[in-house]
Amino acid sequence: MPTIAYAYNPWPTLPASSNKQLFYFHHRGQAKNPFLAANSVEIDPLIAKLPYRSSIGYVHASRHWDANLDATRQILTLLAADTSVTDMEVNRGITIGKLARKGLEAGFEHSMVLATHYMFPAGDKHRTALIALHLFQQDFLRRLEGPSRSDPPSTPLQRYLDDVVRGIESEDKAGGNGGKEMLDELRNAFHSVDPGKIHNVEGYLEFRRYDVGSMFCVAAAKFSVKSATPLDHPRYSRFLKSFSNHLSLINDLASYDKEVRALELRGVGQMVNVVDAVKKATCLRSTEDAKTVTWLLQLQFEKEMMDEFDTLLAQGLSDEDRWFLEAVLACAVGNIMYSTTTTRYGGEAAKLGKSHQISELLV
């Protein structure tokens, strides 16, 4: 298990009296989710006084940290060494090779690798390792098209990625069909999308739901519990829309200050963030007030998810469908935990004086 060495707080300052109801999704069903029970532990970030600002109580952490870490280290090592991609530029002179080498520096266990650990805790050891590779989706999307006789693998990286695709296909044969959807969504996700003219917060969220790649996260959560639940079924549309909005809000709250600094450094560019959209739509004077409204929207989407979950339970859900929805909920709160404890947003300024062990937070 990783140590918790960073605690970044992107949320607004609120009075101590601003208490909120806690929902416990894993206590609402008839049978305990066997995938979460077998592959994760429940933790309470508030035990360590971490800035966990959610109305959904408890977070799940994967038991398969080593598998996640090993898969991440392997793909970074291959990316750093592969001459066919090392010089490929991804952003303003930054190459894939440079990104991979930086990723292997000391402390990488506190970076993006934590996303899989907290966001997809229901997966077994093998599926966790396969999901971990989503962290580098932009770096090897072409190889994720799958093995091709007309384009034979010529490097260790390419051969490895072909093996990854075959591994995902094999897992689907063993249970569910989330692997294929995960690959399909990966090909569609994380591309730069022109926001165009956004006139209100809903318009921004509609753009961001695609831009943030939320359906990849849904498919990965589905893959983690070996589910075949149809993602396009109308009965799940409201739940998944609330999840996608929630994912966007958390990511934007966490990255806002970092984006502002980057914009000031460049001197040119466009702020594309829900905090800015809220500020413009409401004519609020301060960023702090806009963050407060954004946080309240976060709580609203959490309530919508839980209300819709209860409605679906009352209408009747198979165990497989309920386990899928619970995996998506675990992904939502896991994203909050990841955003708080990674170095991605707060950097070294968020480093704690004393690290915490996961075992200290068990409930």
Image (cartoon, helix red, strand yellow):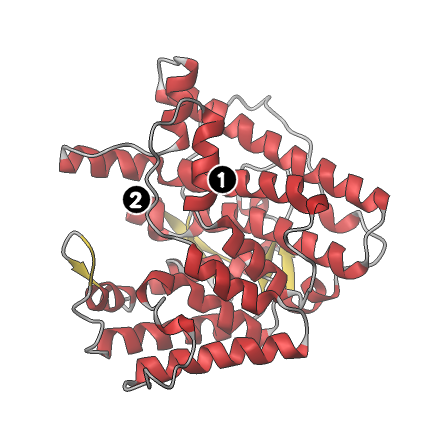
Query: In percent of the image, x 36 and y 77: which residue is there?
Result: 74
304 relative to 223, above or below? above
Please state which of residues 192 and 157 is positioned toward the viewer in this rendering: 192
**Which amino acid lies under the numbered mark 1 shown in the image of this protein?**
Pro
Q: Which residue is mark 1?
A: 51
Label 1 to label 2: alpha-carbon separation? 15 Å
> Which numbered tag is attached to residue 349?
2
Query: In percent of the image, x 14 and y 33: which residue is there?
Result: 267
Query: In percent of the image, x 47 and y 51: which residue is there?
Result: 338
* Residue 269 image-quadrant placement: top left
Query: Which sits earlier in the primary sequence, circle 1 or circle 2?
Result: 1
Please state which of residues 307 and 58 is positioned toward the viewer in this rendering: 307
Q: Could you say whether the residue bearing mark 1 is in a helix, strand or loop?
A: loop
Residue 203: image x %, image y %? 45, 29
Q: Could you say whether the residue bearing mark 2 is in a helix, strand or loop?
A: helix
Asked whether residue 57 is in view, the answer is no
* Residue 134 image-quadrant placement: bottom left
Residue 166: image x %, image y %? 50, 81
In-image side of 89 versus 239 (left or right) = left
192 relative to 263, above or below? below
